[in-house]
Image (spheres, helix red, strand yellow):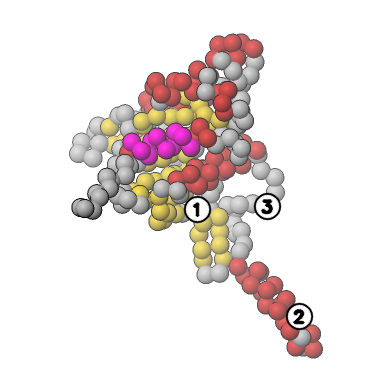
Amino acid sequence: MVFHKHPLYSRFDKLCRLLNGGLSFAGNIVPIGMKETSLLYEYWCFLKIIGLLRERFDLKEQSVVQVNRLRTTVALSKGKSSAMRFVHKPTGKPLYVVYNRLFNRLPTIAQKPDNVIQFASEDKFYIFDAKYRIQFDGDYVKLYGGPGPTSDDVNTMHRYRDAIAIPHPMKPQEYKQGVVAGAVVLFPYPNEEAFRAHKFYKSINQVEIGGLPFLPGATTLVAEKIEALLSAEYPDPPTVSAPA
């Protein structure tokens, strides 16, 4: 009690109480301990895409960070969908970014890409799939023009576009195909300018399938691609000048 009467001790005690009750990681969502680098890379890719979208969109709803009274829980978990809902500032149109979305209402095999951008319509998606691996053997470099995503991962992007469909809203036994506008592999490679000459970079403009390097110091190409997608889907309304 004598210590508590001193203003510095009293303030320190108050700060400790606030910190103890303000932030905690509960349950098995974010366990303390080692994590696989590939999983951390998926997390970072999702959060960085969110950051790139915040420049043109307002975040309206999210299920990643959950607040319960004075406790905050981070709920970005492998195998569970986490969604962020944005609204385009000039037009008010919605946009969703979903981590680990499961497309399971398919006539064949369920598909679960890492990062899915869903545009204003209910039947148009773009996939950015994080793969923490890179191929750079001699035969690969000679064939594709430099280090890049593995050919198996690029084939997976083809599979996503062909396999993912959604149930037809008016015809219960039919599916709407072609809902995935494109699919890109995100992989850890720092030399973005050199990758512009890569076959899997050029293929994005040709067939909307390919790869893009994505690291904390290499975000330009992904930012350019997201900006191109947004400009096509969410064009800013024309400004009307006041009469003279």
Q: Are marks 2 and 3 in contact (CB under 8 Å)?
A: no
Span colored in magenta:
223-232
The correct choice, above or below, for 55 with respect to 21 in the image is above
What is the residue that sits farthest to the right in this orientation? 2
Which type of secondary structure does the marked residue at label 2 adopt?
helix
Q: Quadrant of residue 101?
A: top left
Which type of secondary structure does the marked residue at label 1 adopt?
loop
Residue topped by disc 1: 64
Of 141 and 132, which appears nearest the observer?
141
Q: Nearer the viewer, mark 2 or mark 1?
A: 2
Under mark 1, the amino acid is Val
Is residue 223 toward the left or the right of residue 39 in the image?
left
Give neighbour class at mark 1: few <14, some 14-19, many 20+ (Cα, 10 Å). Answer: some
Which residue is drawn at the image coordinates 41% and 48% (left, top)?
Answer: 56
Q: Are marks 1 and 3 in contact (CB under 8 Å)?
A: no
Q: Quadrant of residue 6?
A: bottom right
Residue topped by disc 3: 32
Under mark 2, the amino acid is Tyr
Q: Which mark is residue 140?
A: none
The Cα atoms of the two marked residues, 1 and 3, are separated by 18 Å
Of 198 and 112, which appears nearest the observer?
198
Which residue is drawn at the image coordinates 72% and 76% (left, top)?
Answer: 12
Q: Position of residue 145 (x, y in %)?
A: 56, 15
Q: Which mark is residue 9?
A: 2
Does the magenta run of residues contain 230? yes
Of 5 and 107, which appears nearest the observer?
5
